[in-house]
Amino acid sequence: MRLSTFLRSNAEKILTAWDEFAATVAHDGTMMHKKDLRDHAGEILAAIANDLEQPQSAAEQEEKSRGGGRQAHGELESAAETHADTRMVSGFAIDAMITEYRALRANVVQLWTSAGGGQDHQNDMRDLIRFNEAMDQAIAESVARYTDQTKKSTDLFIGILGHDIRNPLGTISMSAQYLVRSGQLAAHAADAIINSVVRINRVIEHVVDFTRSQSEGLMPIKPSPGNLVNQFEKVVDETRVRNPKATVRLESTGDFNGTWDEGRMGQLLSNLLTNAISYGARDKPVTVRLWEQQDQVVFSVHNLGTPIPLKEQQQIFKPLVRGLVPARAEQREPTGLGLGLFICQEIVRAHGGSIAVSSDAASGTSFTVTLPRTPP
């Protein structure tokens, strides 16, 4: 029996096994009816059977094996995409959905071989290859749809986070400044409020940027001509205002004109300065140095204090890794979510540059960034 005929004549047996397996897959915990468990498995199975019965040349098979071909635009795509939609709504994680496909593939092959499939070596081998191609295509379509829907949810989350939290934070900051001007609040009390607002905003920026970099693959930037020293002077001045007890120096030699995203460059330096001030020795300066290197510009942020252990240096740019601060280190503020240095790395990567860290007790800690004058 050819595999396509087997799929049609044994559809109910195959789909019953699908139902039983789907019922064991972990999801959001709600009970699901048989119809919900079966979902669009019947349509997927029928689409695969239809595909197996269509003539296919060697060139078409080659194209299909590379992700193209006729089936990528037909009924299989629609059934697999809809299956992804319903599984996502039902609370199935993407790996659980893929596991369903694996179980369906294994079940079909087992039932078919038990029924005598595989004896006509040439035709059956061809059917099995095409069946696996169709299954792979269905998985690819479901994963692509699931990923696309996840990205849309991510974009919505970013919009809510950026709008619904930042606006009230702005109101808090402006209200504190008004109370100081009207004499109803002491300046030092207002400074504590405003600094807290700044830190919360920084956490929001980190979460938004982390989410975007994960969903889009690369930090979005908008480069424009500018002078890196001029941009950094603003960030250093702002850092001094927010950290009046810290000593922050800026040193530069050479020409620093180029094309960068000014906002991202400011965010990069601000994150590195925050890190240096948080972990550096209180009585020692934090120094920002810029210099030229052929067609590139280089800058470093240096601080003295407790060095970063070598093991931690190897993973310091990974997301959600917070600094393991020794008890003797003098830390000035909370380390946040552990996204700051990851965001730095992503900003540098988006500009086509590189970032590295060196740290020891004698020389201190330096984060060094190398950037092309024009991003790729």
Image (cartoon, rainbow, N blue to C red):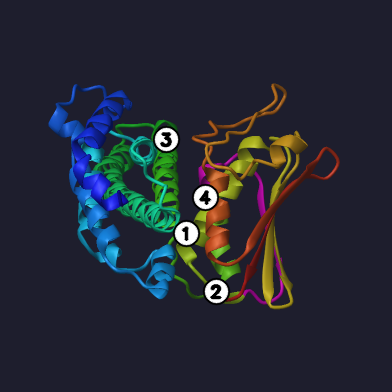
For marks 3 and 2, give the CA distance: 37 Å
Question: Mark 1 vs mark 2: which is more N-terminal?
Answer: 1
Closest to the camera, between mark 1 and mark 4, is 1
Q: Earlier in the sequence, mark 1 or mark 4?
A: 1
Q: Are marks 4 and 2 in contact (CB under 8 Å)?
A: no
Q: Amino acid at mark 1?
A: Leu
* N-term mark: 3 or 2: 3
Is 375 placed left or right of 220 in the picture?
Answer: right
Looking at the image, residue 174 sits to the left or right of residue 241; the answer is left
Q: Secondary structure at mark 3?
A: helix
User: Which residue matches tag 2?
Assistant: 376
Identify the element where label 1 is drawn. loop
Please state the horizontal and vertical placement of residue 373, each as a whole percent of the image. 61, 75
Q: Residues within 10 Å of mark 2 (few under 14, many from 20)?
A: few
SS of the residue under disc 2? loop
**Mark 1 touches mark 2? (CB < 8 Å):** no
Q: Is residue 264 magenta?
A: no
User: Which region of the structure is painted magenta?
Assistant: 241-256
Which residue carries the number 4 mark? 343
Of the 4 image quadrants, the one containing the C terminus is bottom right
Residue nearest the observer in this picture, 341 or 156 = 156
Q: Amino acid at mark 3?
A: Ser
Per the image, is 247 magenta? yes
The crowding category of the residue bearing disc 4, from other C-alpha atoms within 10 Å (few below 14, some 14 to 19, many at least 20), is many
Decide: is 31 above or below 307. Answer: above
Q: Is residue 305 visible?
A: no
In the displayed structure, 265 sits above or below 295; it is above
- Which residue is found at the position 60% from the left and 48% from the top? 273
The amino acid type of the residue labelled 2 equals Pro
Task: Identify which residue is drawn at 59% across, 77% down.
Answer: 257
